[in-house]
Structures are given as C-alpha cells and as structure tokens.
Amino acid sequence: MERARHGAFYTMTTTTFSRRTLMRAFAATAVTAAPVMANATGFLRGAGDIRRLTMYNGRAGETLDMIYWIDGDYIAPALQEITYFMRDWRNNQVHAIDARTIDIMTAAHRLLETDEPYMLLSGYRSPETNAMLRSRSSGVARNSLHMQGEAADLRVNSRSVNQVASAASACNSGGVGRYSGSNFVHMDCGPVRTWGG
C-alpha cells in the first residue's frame, strides 16, 4: 500500500559528536518539552524548523518519508502515518507512537549524517506478539515499552550498531540498547539508560 509522502532532505554539516556540534545543536531556542527530551529536541531545533523521518520495513514491504513537524507544530496526519507504519506487522494492530520516541529517532538519524533510511525491525508490539517473542527469547521484557508505542528497534546498514547507539545515546533522552549479535539498536522514550554490547 502506498502511503503519502512529503518534504525534502536535510543534513548536518559536521561529522563527529564534538562539543561544538552539540552546543550548536542545542543553541537555537529554549526547550519547551519535558526535561528528559531536552537533548533530542535541542538537536532537532537546528533543522530549519522541520523534522523528517525516513524508514522502510522489509517485512511489510513499505517505505516512509515523512515531515511530521514544521515551525514548532506536530502535523497530526503525519504522526498518524508514522503510527500506521510502525504498527505490529504480525497482526496489523495499530497503537499511537509517542512523539518523543519519533523525535529521538529523528535526532539520532541526523547525527548519523546519512540519507539512508532506518530499517524498522519493530515498532509497536501487541501484547500477543510480545508474549510470543518472550517465549522465544529471554531478551524481551514482559512490560516492553514497545507495547506502549514508546520504542523502536532500528538498523542503518551503512552504520555499525555502535555508531547508531552512540548517536541515540548522545541525545540523552531515553533508553538505548545495543544488540550487536542481531545488528540493531533499540531506542525508547523511557528513563535514560543503556545496555547491551
């Protein structure tokens, strides 16, 4: 199914997460989001007043290229498109995706300085899907933030797990899990914490 597409690409001009890069990203304006989101929002405020997310889902055969925030306002239909895209692909159940998670994903992607979209491995997970995954792996949390629409498991083929996780950790805005053996990074808008290797 083809979904709506909007907008144009943007890139950062620096290649490392230097103190200067971080300060420039934070310098634009005062942050109005909750304190835990201050860093991710700060990175995004230097974006020319747009926020854009690009992803593909090989399992569902879908791509997404969406501007979801312009000039200080979230675009409700765009957030709905992202929510649909990040649905539980195993049973097509849909749950609202927390905009804080979307912002963390977008800020981390900006720091990676690539036009390659994320590969979405897991967004929202229904309780049934989470229970099935828990029965197969000890690494799946009983009360996973995926079930609240607050987490995503992502891969960028041109970047290592460590590079993607470092970008997400630089936002200091939620949980970041490194899953090197499975080649993906977990990002969520829960408490700031890191795990994995």
Image (cartoon, rainbow, N blue to C red):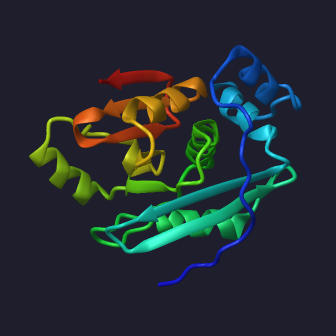
Which residue occupies 44% across, 46% down? Answer: 158
Q: Position of residue 65 (x, y in %)?
A: 61, 66
Q: Position of residue 2 (x, y in %)?
A: 53, 83
Left or right: 185 in relation to 12: left
Which residue occupies 10% across, 47% down? Answer: 136
Q: Position of residue 164 (x, y in %)?
A: 47, 35
Occupied quadrant, residue 34: top right
Which residue occupies 74% across, 52% down? Answer: 10
In this view, the residue farthest toward the top is 19
Quadrant including the C terminus: top left
Instruction: Please tell me whether residue 170 is drawn above or below residue 86 in the rendered image.
Output: above
Instruction: Please tell me whether residue 67 is drawn above or below residue 170 in the rendered image.
Output: below
Instruction: Please tell me whether residue 172 is drawn above or below residue 7 in the rendered image.
Output: above
Kindly tell me whether residue 144 is visible in this rendering.
yes
Left or right: 140 in relation to 116: left
Left or right: 189 in relation to 70: left
Which residue occupies 71% across, 15% down? Answer: 19
Kindly tell me whether residue 172 is visible in this rendering.
no
Q: Nearer the viewer, residue 49 or 30?
A: 49
